[in-house]
Image: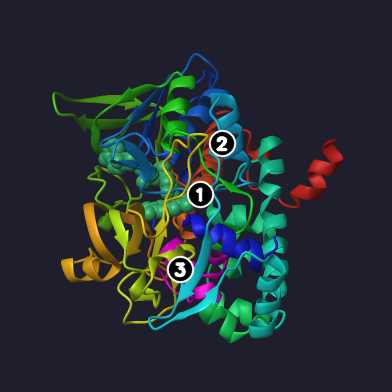
Amino acid sequence: MANGVVVLIAVLLLERSAAVGDQADPSHVDGAPPSKIAVVGAGIGGSSTAHFLRQHFGPEVQVDVFEKGEVGGRLATVTVNHHDYESGGSIIHSLNLHMQEFVKVLGLKYRRSVAGKTAVFNGDEMILEETDWYLLDLFRLWWRYGISFIRLQMWVEEIMEKFMRIYKYQAHGYAFSSVEELLDSLGGSGFLNMTRKPLSDSLLEVGVSQRFIDEVIAPIMRVNYGQNVSIPAFVGAVSLAGAQNNLWSVEGGNKLVCSGLIKTANANLHQAQVTSIAPVTSGDTLQYRLSFTSETDSGSDLYDIVVLATPLQESVQSGITFEDFSPPFDQLPGYYHSTVATIVHGYLNTTFFGFPDPRLFPFASVLTTDEPRLFFNSVASICPVNISAGFRRKQPQEAGIYKVFSPHTLDKVQLKSLFRSYYSVQLTEWSAYPRYGSSSSLPSIELQPNLYYLNGIEWAGSAMEMSSVAAKNIALLAYHRWNRQDDKVDQKDLMHKIKTEL
Ligand SMILES: Cc1cc2nc3c(=O)[nH]c(=O)nc-3n(C[C@H](O)[C@H](O)[C@H](O)COP(=O)(O)OP(=O)(O)OC[C@H]3O[C@@H](n4cnc5c(N)ncnc54)[C@H](O)[C@@H]3O)c2cc1C
């Protein structure tokens, strides 16, 4: 999510599955712990799963993590001029408690944020400009949008307050067998409805004006999810929370959390692609055979528990085939939205935004409205993952490092219209987050007994913390299922239960 949104919103917000059902038949009636667990994927989802599995199953179990690409997955950096810059997930909310805990446990540092102003561009002109004067910004917001921004803030806060219950539930060891159960326990049917209802409808209902939705909310959805205000209200709220104040990132790069967690979990990292998974039964015991290939090797191994921590939709090309599953299991419906992150070292063409003199261009980031003529979602001056004490953001008249988010690769003409000249251009084409609306259901967490799927949560909301919440849930669920502790799974009225436990 764009760094610059932080500052603008500081003002705006003041702050398919093979059914498991009753066939679940745990393979360990004798109370013996599992001996081997596999995690497929070493993004924040897979690495935090390894960490939580170690916490719950103890030191004896062998945890193997398979990664076909780079550890970090969608948390990645690119190097420009000897400095590294986030090209994937970049911003973490101050109330993302799992991410905070990881940074603490790993002895990592918070990265200092560097102030910069934000504006919204509609293809012709800037329609909203942040200034140096907080009260002036507030007055302007009130003048243009009435009290929409206060209504928005109240709406987001109420959702966040309910979402925060997950940390209590998880601290008390409760787990959920589906994303639906998890959401229902946090916010009842209201949360579930929010995964189906368009964001714009929900906001209009709470009195946010259409103009505010078009000029403020749409630009935030474009920069955070590359989509429009018809995305479901729940993910919209995740996105709006990620546009608030008090955001942070990890000094040295967010992906350090992933490598750190795999290490502290004492998990074995296999740089290999899992190519197939097949259930293997022997007597009462169910295991899974994972086949994998690496640059130098190929092989297969048996596991008691398997966690798939990578999207299983066709567009993401995990390359995993499901063999001998009954009923058959294949790729999941829906697809992932493509977002291109282009990192440019050059001179921004401020004339494009109506500022012929770059010295008079005061903005660090520009968001855009949902205007078909616009070929990009946002452009922002970005800071390296290591910020030295004397670091200052480059002025628009100087060559700087910019990140452009767009739905397609920028061609030369487009680059030339956004930049007067440039030294280098690096792009990463991401299967970034679900294309909301391309699937009508939330994917299952339990695909088969002892076979879990993490990334279904992304269809409620895609963010580092969502993957971490899903990871903790799967570690707890796997532990309770293995030990037949059904009183810790899908319990109702948890707030009350927890109070009476104290
Ligand atoms: C451009 C962009 C900006 C974003 N901005 C933010 C932000 O600011 N804040 C935020 O919170 N979130 C942000 N997100 C979302 C966030 O990055 C993701 O939700 C999160 O990183 C997903 O992590 P994951 O581990 O669940 O999946 P991934 O990171 O996708 O990890 C899956 C891993 O599995 C590996 N894999 C796949 N198939 C196989 C196989 N067969 N065998 C072995 N390994 C396999 C992949 O190589 C990958 O490393 C952003 C995402 C993008 C793309």
The x and y percentages for residue 494 are: 75, 48
Against 240, residue 41 (above or below) is above
The x and y percentages for residue 427 are: 25, 53
Q: Which mark is residue 110?
A: 2
Against 180, residue 361 (above or below) is below
Disc 1 C-beta below 8 A from ligand 1: yes
Q: Earlier in the sequence, mark 2 or mark 3?
A: 2
Q: Which mark is residue 360?
A: 3
The x and y percentages for residue 166 are: 66, 47
Total numbered labels placed on residues in the image: 3
Q: Residue at position x 45%, y 40% from top?
A: 45
Q: Amino acid at mark 1?
A: Ile
Name the residue that disc number 1 marks: 91
Q: Amino acid at mark 2?
A: Tyr
**Cα distance, mark 2 to mark 3?**
32 Å
Q: Secondary structure at mark 3?
A: helix
Q: Nearer the viewer, residue 302 or 153?
A: 153
Q: Quadrant location of residue 336?
A: bottom left
**Left or right of residue 142: residue 89:** left
Quarter of the rendering occupied by the C terminus: top right
Q: Quadrant location of residue 139?
A: bottom right
Q: Nearer the viewer, residue 378 or 464?
A: 378
Residue stretch in magenta: 216-238
Q: Earlier in the sequence, mark 1 or mark 3?
A: 1
As for residue 228 lying within the magenta part, the answer is yes
**Left or right of residue 234: residue 207:** right
